[in-house]
Image (spheres, helix red, strand yellow):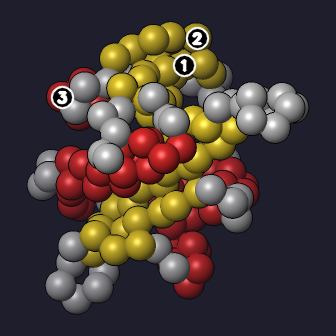
Amino acid sequence: MIRRAAVTDHPWIVETGAEAYRDLGDYTAILPSWLEQRGVLAWIDHDVSGRGRGFAMLGFYLDDPQKPPGQAKVVADLLALAILPAHQGRGIGTALLTHVLDVAERVAYSSGIPSIRLSVAENNIGAQRLYLRHGFQVVDGSTTYDKGQRALRMVRALTPVT
């Protein structure tokens, strides 16, 4: 089951994300800063007992906040998608990604958002396959994380819901 994350869930998200992304850098600093930003939404997938199995974070940002009002475009960014190792391979990542895409497509029409983007570790083949199955395409392989890990930039067009 997927539900919107509450502020009380933030420590669990940070702990889970730090574990999932430990090879990529210090996410104990990155995740809280994302969670505090306006325009960032988070969801948790949990079992019937309420125990979290994974989470997703979606951010809506201006492409260039320095542009004059009305000229900056809103972009959608899948900031994080993490599933606890014990729950991987059970469709939870697919369910969370589908949920995020549904939300982004509902917002796309009124906000003029043409696409959603993400970064994925170059060696995270499972996640890349998930994103490719859902229509994402690789647009750049030059992004690096703070530990020097290479990442692919991927993008997917949004089909706005009117």
> Residue 66, percent across and down?
87, 32
Give the Cα distance between marks 1 and 2: 7 Å
Residue at which label 1 appears: 150
Write the residue at 81% across / 38% down: 69
Query: What SS does tag 1 mark?
Result: strand
> Residue 83, percent across and down?
32, 55
Query: What SS does tag 3 mark?
Result: helix
Write the residue at 30% across / 46% down: 161
Q: In this view, does 141 lie above or below 57?
A: above
Marked residue nearer the N-terminal end (2 or 3): 3
In the image, is 23 to the left or to the right of 94? right
Query: What amino acid is at disc 2?
Result: Ser
Query: What SS does tag 2 mark?
Result: strand
Q: Which of 40 and 160 is in front in this view?
A: 160
| Front of the two marks 2 and 3 | 3
| Front of the two marks 1 and 2 | 2
| Front of the two marks 3 and 1 | 3
Is residue 127 in view from this perspective? no
Residue at which label 2 appears: 142
Residue at which label 3 appears: 133
Query: What amino acid is at disc 3?
Result: Arg
Q: Which of 128 and 118 is in front in this view?
A: 118
Marked residue nearer the N-terminal end (3 or 1): 3
Q: Residues within 10 Å of mark 3 (few under 14, many from 20)?
A: few
Residue furthest bottom in the image: 49
Give the Cα distance between marks 3 and 1: 21 Å
> Residue 89, percent across and down?
15, 49
Query: What amino acid is at disc 1?
Result: Arg
Q: Which of 100 and 108 is in front in this view?
A: 108
Write the residue at 40% across / 47% down: 104
